[in-house]
Amino acid sequence: MSDFETVAATENQAARRGPSGEPGTPDKIGTSHKPRSLAGDAWRDLRRNPIFWISLALVTAVSLMAIAPGLFTSNDPQDCVLSRQNSGPSAGAIFGYDFQGCDTYARAVYGSRASLLVGALSALFTGIIALAVGLLAGYFGRWVDAVLSRLIDIVLGIPLLLAAIVLLKRIGSASPNARITAVIFVLAVLGWTTAARVVRSSVITAKEQDYVAAARMLGAGHGRIMLRHILPNALAPAIVVLTIALGSFIAAEATLSFLGIGLKAPTISWGQDIDTGRIHMRESATPLIVPSAFLALTVLAFIMLGDAIRDAFDPKLR
Amino acid sequence: MFRFILRRLLQMVLAFFGTTLIVYALMFAGQTDPIQALAGERPVTAAQRAYLTEKYHLDQTGVGGFFYRYFDYVRSLLQGDLGQSLTGRQIGDILQQAWPVTVKLALIALAVAVVFGVTSGVIAGIRRAGIFDNSTLVLTLLVLGIPTIVLAPLAQYFLGVKWQLFPPTAGAEPSFYALLLPGIVLGSLSLATALRLTRTSVAENLRADYVRTARSKGLVKRRIVSVHVLRNSLIPVVTFLGVELGNLMSGAIITEGVFNIPGVGFNLFRGIRTEDGPLVVGFVSVLVVVYLISNLLVDVLYAVLDPRIRYE
């Protein structure tokens, strides 16, 4: 349990690195005639950051794997023949076969689909909840804010893994798709709080701006002001938080599947494969190491990508 | 201060009822026939049925009956009666037996986090942007990004099975040596966070006015760091470690499961696998309470330690 929460909690710290926090050097201002936008500045920073490119490449690769696993392997992950149990690498299977005689590499490739699907959809729903709650709390303030902020505090106080165990145990034996939906639902319901706080604070800053007052004077309603003038300000920080959250959601899904309450058998997932690999590690370690490496790299890629984007967009934090 | 504690306490009570209600509603309510679910495949005689209906107040129907049974559950939870697991043992007994092991493991993990995390955090904070600083940042990002379900089995395989530096699993009555590797794995996450917290906080405090004053008074650097900076920098770290102790006690499900340590997390791990509903619910309820209380204590501790923080 502590995994997800500490990852989320340290993100704030993680962002505050890099060399001293002196304000930007003034000599660069005179060199360009056209003032650069925030996004332009951020892009210039990102382009020179190797971590950004590495993580982007990893994210692209794993996404491609999830969409079209056939591009990466021609073997069927469900084609398991017991006679080749734990046999070593060969021309057909570069990482050999696992305990059940399935192609280790093919299983890891096909496992990306469920992980990414759960991660992306959880992040999407988390984003929707966070944007709605953050916008309402930040924009209306007063009692709306009080109620919603207390709600955030309470949900934040619920330990994620323990709550997920209870929520998912209720599902019992359901169809593979129902399980995936359940896992996404649980992660979204429990995981939206950090993003909602971020949205709320950027909404509070944005609503004091002059252009918001101008829009109000021109007769714009609450809905229009929120959606057209304030939401765009909250979007960039929210996307950064959600990218990092996507990584943690993938880790959370794998942990739940590892425990045997997340995704189950016909669905191929890294968490389950790590668990079976772990049990048979004395006979052959590759079925443990390969899905572990896939999972760790994917989670790291999303976390590093989000970190890099935030550093670029928020130079103050450095 | 008093108002803050009161408000925080109220919040905790709300969170307690909220979570236990969810736990209860999901586990026990909504079952078509709870008595049959309790008995499993065996047939239930009419006498047994009547006895259980009486015992669990199942004759009360509707929303009122639900809350009646819910408060029954909360009352026995508060009295320490967690009921029986499917194996027939008292859950309270299992918990009592498992608790010391988990505390031992958590303390080892915490010691690892304090010794390595805080020390390297101070060094990294003083030599900011140096080689040591940058390499620890990369290393901690790796540790924070790699899930425990990857870290624990791989550590077990490489350090325990392949190179045989540590015993790969701990059995009943584990020795300190057997708990060392799981303690390090469990503590690595807190280590990384503690390191980053210490580093940021030391680096911030080094730029504070009072440090400049101390320096201009002619104090040696060692004294400035160890007395002036450290005392202020460790406040957030101490509170973090307080939360972590609560987390470690409840969050060791994976680590204890992988390393076969007969603690709280291991029992929960096994309860999930063997679909032992009452055991899982009992343990989760207790762990949630532990978690909520440790969070509360830490929040109060934070306000006590740092007088600059005033909650209205």
Image: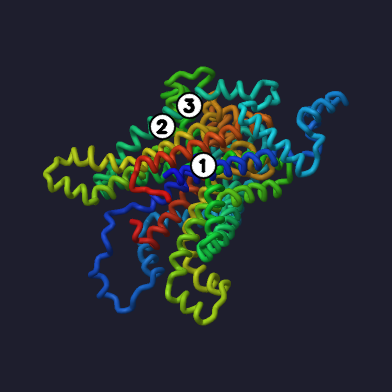
Look at label 1 and name its amino acid.
Leu
**Residue A89: quadrant of the picture:** top right
Q: Secondary structure at mark 3?
A: helix
- The residue beneath circle 2 is B110
Label 1 lies in what chain? B
Instruction: Report the mark closest to the observer, 2 or 1.
Output: 1
Q: Is residue B104 left or right of residue B90?
A: left
Q: Residue at x 44, y 70 (%)?
A: A208
* Disc 2 + disc 1, Cβ < 8 Å: no
Residue lying furthest left = B218
In this rendered view, identify the residue nearer to me: A50 or A7: A7
Give the amino acid type for the residue marked by disc 2 in the picture: Leu
Residue A110 vs B86, above or below: the answer is: below
For image coordinates 50% across by 38% down, the residue present is B148
- How many numbered markers are drawn? 3
Q: Are marks 1 and 3 in one subunit?
A: yes
| Quadrant where the C terminus of chain A is found in the figure | bottom left
Q: Residue at x 35, y 73 (%)?
A: A36
Element class at badge 1: helix
Q: Amino acid at mark 3?
A: Val
Residue closest to the eye, B257 or B95? B95
Residue at horizontal 81 percent and vertical 30 percent from the top: B53
State if disc 3 and disc 1 touch (CB < 8 Å): no
Which residue, given by chain and number where applicable, does mark 3 sit on? Answer: B103
The earlier-in-sequence mark between 1 and 3 is 1
Circle 2 packing at 10 Å, graded few (<14), some (14-19), many (20+), is many
Q: Secondary structure at mark 2?
A: helix
Disc 3/disc 2 C-alpha distance (Å): 10 Å
Tell me residue B42's x, y (percent): 82, 25
Which residue in the rendered view is the most extreme toward the bottom? A218
Q: Specify the label residue B9 is tagged with.
A: 1
Q: CA distance from mark 1 to mark 3?
A: 25 Å
